[in-house]
């Protein structure tokens, strides 16, 4: 369960300093979490997917965060939870003709939402047996103790206190040169709600992310006082998606969390410029965002989200629904 911990025992996966930073700031940047060989393999897979998906039967669904047009919510999106699907940048189309202005591989905003299951290189990241580069990380005999910096996601989840971590979605976000869309301030638990909130984002840079090409930025500490006020759910009419007021708990369990009346959500965001191979862990209540990419450099990242399966409720209103097999289990304590 994602309960704030003031103690920072050395559990592997995360150093005590990384744990302290995560609980204090709501995020932590871990440089060199992926070795260059893994970064290369994931980028190669991303480019192969982008080059090879067929346009002939694609509904041309655009990924919209709701700033310019309604939030994405068509059938192609709603049934993508157990598939590898491709969502276009809003600005990849000529407004007068509706035609793509870029080759398809440079027009995709994101690929989702089951790379962690359906794509062998991405699936290997979660499976120690398939990923010897990360094997043993976070254990007393593993990479952290041995001075290597890579950490296995399961060891990281354990360090954060998860009992039954479930990976429920994964995405490559491309932030394409010149047209990569902005992501407005949000909390991941709005989109991946559990009662009580428990989501944590694992965000891996596969290319350097800078202020120029739209790196993440964060409102440090906001996870402790910013309530999850809204939920992104399947629309009550059965058509599309909508935001509704969150009638359930707005914070994870723990006395360190609580709304501070008058606290501004417009505070100063801190830039998170990172090198390829870095992992950024993001608390589900943390306000974070990224700007548009107007530069000529792309910014490909891979992210997946984990929720707690023990002692939480995941309900049928959430936009993302599990397949009959359930969400992918990292381990069970
Ligand atoms: O990669 C980005 O630009 C935004 C990602 C993000 O905010 C998220 O995954 O929650």
Image (cartoon, helix red, strand yellow):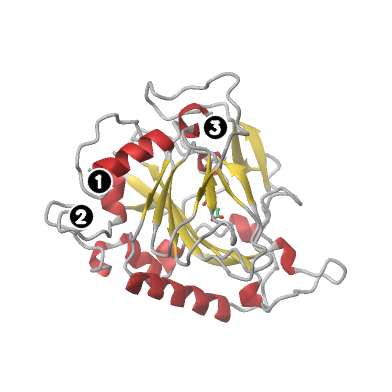
Is 323 placed left or right of 59 in the picture?
left
Q: Quadrant of residue 62?
A: bottom right
- Residue 24 vs residue 59, the one in the foreground: 24
- The CA distance from mark 1 to mark 2 is 8 Å
Question: Up-down: is 310 above or below 258?
Answer: below
Q: Is residue 123 left or right of residue 12?
A: right
Say left or right for 192 vs 161: right
Which numbered disc flags the more N-terminal residue, 3 or 2? Answer: 2
Report the front residue among 89 and 211. 211
Distance Cα–Cα, label 1 vs label 3 = 28 Å
Q: Is residue 45 above or below residue 195?
A: below
Q: Which mark is residue 144?
A: 2
Residue closest to the eye, 21 or 95: 21
> What is the secondary structure assignment of the residue under circle 2?
loop
- The image quadrant where one finds the N terminus is top left
| Residue 291 locus on image (x, y percent) | 63, 53
Q: Residue furthest top?
A: 261
Question: Does residue 167 appear anywhere in the picture?
Answer: yes
Q: Which residue is mark 1?
A: 15
Residue 97 is situated, as x and y percent measured from the top left of the image, at: 86, 72
Of discs 1 and 3, which sits in the foreground?
1
- Could you tell me if the residues under marks 1 and 2 are in contact, i.e. CB atoms within 8 Å? yes
Image quadrant assignment for residue 39: bottom left
Residue visible at 72% across and 68% down in the picture: 92
């Amino acid at each position: 369960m994602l309960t704030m911990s003031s103690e920072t025992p050395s559990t592997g996966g995360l150093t005590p300093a990384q744990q302290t930073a995560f609980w204090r700031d709501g995020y932590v940047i871990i440089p060199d979490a992926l070795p260059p060989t893994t970064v290369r393999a994931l980028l190669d897979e991303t480019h192969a997917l982008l080059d090879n998906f067929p346009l002939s039967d694609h509904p041309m669904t655009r990924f919209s965060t709701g700033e310019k047009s309604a939030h994405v919510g068509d059938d192609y999106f709603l049934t993508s939870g157990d598939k590898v699907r491709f969502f276009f940048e809003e600005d990849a189309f000529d407004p007068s003709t509706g035609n793509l202005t870029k080759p398809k591989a440079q027009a995709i905003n994101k690929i989702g939402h089951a790379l962690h299951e359906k794509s062998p290189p991405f699936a290997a990241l979660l499976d120690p047996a398939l990923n010897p580069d990360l094997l043993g990380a976070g254990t007393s005999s593993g990479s952290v103790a041995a001075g290597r910096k890579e950490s296995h996601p399961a060891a990281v989840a354990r360090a954060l206190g998860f009992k039954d971590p479930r990976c429920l979605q994964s995405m490559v976000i491309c932030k394409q040169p010149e047209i990569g869309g902005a992501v407005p301030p949000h909390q991941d638990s709005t989109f991946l709600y559990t009662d009580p909130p428990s989501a944590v984002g694992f965000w891996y840079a596969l290319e350097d992310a800078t202020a120029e090409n739209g790196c993440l930025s964060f409102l440090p500490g906001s996870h402790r006082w910013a309530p999850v006020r809204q939920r992104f759910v399947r629309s009550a009419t059965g058509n599309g998606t909508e935001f509704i007021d969150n009638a359930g708990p707005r914070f994870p369990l723990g006395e360190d969390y609580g709304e501070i009346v008058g606290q501004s959500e417009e505070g100063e965001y801190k830039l998170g410029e990172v090198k390829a191979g870095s992992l950024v862990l993001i608390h589900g209540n943390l306000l974070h965002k990224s700007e548009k990419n107007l530069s000529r450099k792309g910014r490909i990242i891979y992210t997946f989200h984990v929720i707690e399966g023990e002692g939480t409720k995941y309900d049928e209103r959430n936009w993302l629904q599990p397949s009959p097999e359930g969400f992918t289990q990292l381990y069970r304590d």
